[in-house]
């Protein structure tokens, strides 16, 4: 922020005459104080009293002008931010055929399209927008703007080729936000929501990750197709012992055991997910470890899978995560990594998602994962089916609406707007190809050729 202020005042020096007049007055006051202290050599009591009075007066004046000047400085910077983001937002919207509609204008409301933005309070709207994507999301939750089809809106404005309004990132670029202690934050805010809520949203599969929509039409079929795809890619056999890092509700392991006859061990720190998983898997050879992935016991598994977990690992820990998988995998085993991916390397996540949905989360890039994998694993296959996440998110949203409208799930109005914004904005991200979904197959010292499956 300080750098932006500095650049702004250098560039706009001709517009800032009021500020510089105040600075000049402060300099004069300082000089006046200097003259009083150094120009009066009389030591009598009367003159000392006068000197002290002059000094006190000068200090008060200087302090007042400093405070006043700083208020002007930051107030002017705030106005600059608002104008900057206002112009940027208008440019972005106009270039992507999106209009700002005044909710008080009946004619505009009558002609609006589903992806147009309906603004209820322009002053508050622009004030929020000046805080980037965090402010845009918070303004939506606060009902300062609305949109009939958020997913279409985000698809339009997240333009991969000309993204002039890039997603704001959190500021903690150099901190490790995914330590053992901080890893519980996302569980408490997101994954430890009552599992009955997720039963309604996720469907019978209870899979909270992207489905595979090849030749299927329903969410449950897409999730089962994803389970089968993973098992076939891993070449699961009845004799295998499979490790699932970040096992969620245990549905993938249950599918493996029921359809392939193997045994599984799942790792998770979410109490709600483990509560559900242990109930549904209690009659099967499935064991659960309630621990951080870094604390998985030293044991060699035939196969390892991790679905929708790498997004919570963080760029400072990718190498350690890969090392854990490498050290727990048998030499002839396979590791399948299923993760959302980003098109560019970043060191933090979107500010709104970080605050309200996935604290400390971020998307890995090809380069970041490549550096972690290098000299440890052989990359056998890299499969991208990102557009399928759009369909998955829209199916979750439909299930959520059914549950809310039927009374199966009860949420506050604020939670409802947060959840709607989360699901539909993310759907737009995948539809615009801003985000990807990768399944990566890794081996250690496999001697035979790996034949990819789609």
Image (cartoon, rainbow, N blue to C red):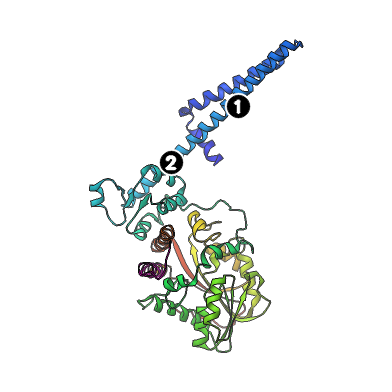
The magenta stretch spans residue 412: no
Looking at the picture, tell me which residue is in the foreground, 442 or 81: 81
Looking at the picture, tell me which residue is in the foreground, 23 or 15: 23
Q: Residues within 10 Å of mark 1 (few under 14, many from 20)?
A: some
Q: Alpha carbon of mark 2 to alpha carbon of mark 1: how far?
A: 29 Å
Res 224 → quadrant: bottom left
Q: Residues within 10 Å of mark 2 (few under 14, many from 20)?
A: many
The disc at residue 274 is none
| Relative to 378, residue 160 above or below | above
The answer to whether one can see residue 122 in this image is: yes
| Relative to 294, residue 215 above or below | below
Element class at badge 2: helix
Q: Is residue 306 shown left or right of residue 412?
A: right
Looking at the picture, tell me which residue is in the foreground, 33 or 61: 61
| Quadrant in which the C terminus is drawn | bottom left
Element class at badge 1: helix
Res 186 → quadrant: bottom right
Q: Which residues are magenta?
A: 392-411
Rendering coords of residue 134 (x, y %): 47, 51
**Pointer 1 residue:** 63
Q: Main secondary structure of the magenta part?
A: helix
The magenta stretch spans residue 403: yes
The answer to whether one can see residue 306 in this image is: no
Rendering coords of residue 356 (x, y %): 49, 58
| Relative to 361, residue 11 above or below | above
Badge 2 or badge 1: first in the primary sequence: 1
Q: Is residue 293 shown left or right of residue 399?
A: right
Name the residue located 35 percent from the left edge and 70 percent from the top edge. Answer: 406
**Pointer 2 residue:** 82
């Amino acid at each position: 922020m300080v750098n932006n202020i500095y650049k702004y005042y250098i560039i706009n020096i001709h517009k800032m005459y009021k500020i510089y007049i105040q600075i000049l007055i402060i300099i004069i006051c300082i000089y006046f104080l200097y003259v009083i202290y150094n120009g009066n050599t009389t030591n009598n009591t009367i003159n000392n009293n006068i000197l002290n009075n002059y000094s006190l007066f000068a200090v008060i004046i200087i302090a007042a002008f400093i405070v006043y000047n700083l208020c002007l400085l930051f107030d002017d910077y705030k106005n600059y931010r608002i104008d900057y983001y206002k112009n940027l937002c208008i440019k972005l919207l106009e270039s992507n055929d999106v209009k700002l509609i005044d909710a008080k204008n009946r004619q505009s409301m009558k002609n609006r399209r589903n992806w147009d933005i309906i603004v209820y309070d322009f002053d508050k709207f622009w004030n929020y927008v000046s805080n980037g994507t965090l402010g845009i999301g918070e303004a939506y939750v606060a009902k300062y703007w609305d949109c009939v089809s958020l997913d279409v809106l985000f698809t339009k404005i997240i333009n991969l080729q000309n993204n002039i309004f890039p997603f704001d990132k959190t500021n903690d670029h150099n901190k490790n936000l995914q330590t053992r202690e901080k890893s519980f934050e996302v569980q408490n805010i997101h994954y430890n929501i009552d599992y009955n809520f997720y039963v309604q949203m996720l469907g019978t599969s209870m899979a909270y990750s992207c489905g595979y929509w090849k030749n299927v039409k329903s969410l449950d079929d897409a999730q089962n197709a994803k389970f089968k795809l993973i098992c076939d890619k891993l070449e699961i056999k009845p004799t295998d012992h499979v490790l699932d890092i970040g096992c969620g509700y245990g549905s993938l392991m249950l599918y493996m055991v029921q359809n392939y006859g193997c045994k599984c061990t799942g790792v998770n720190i979410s109490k709600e997910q483990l509560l559900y998983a242990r109930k549904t898997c209690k009659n099967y050879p499935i064991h659960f470890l309630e621990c951080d992935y870094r604390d998985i016991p030293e044991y060699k598994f035939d196969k390892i899978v991790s679905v929708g977990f790498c997004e919570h690992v963080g760029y400072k820990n990718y190498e350690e995560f890969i090392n854990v998988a490498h050290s727990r995998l048998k030499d002839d085993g396979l590791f399948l990594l299923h993760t959302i991916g980003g098109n560019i390397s970043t060191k933090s996540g979107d500010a709104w998602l970080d605050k309200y949905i996935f604290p400390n989360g971020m998307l890995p890039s090809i380069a970041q994962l490549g550096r972690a994998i290098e000299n440890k694993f052989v990359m056998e296959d890299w499969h991208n089916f990102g557009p399928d996440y759009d369909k998955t998110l829209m199916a979750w949203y439909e299930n959520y609406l059914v549950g809310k409208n039927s009374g199966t799930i009860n949420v506050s109005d604020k939670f409802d707007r947060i959840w709607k914004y989360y699901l539909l904005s993310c759907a737009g991200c995948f539809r615009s190809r801003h985000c990807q979904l990768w399944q990566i197959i890794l081996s250690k010292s496999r001697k035979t050729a790996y034949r990819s499956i789609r």
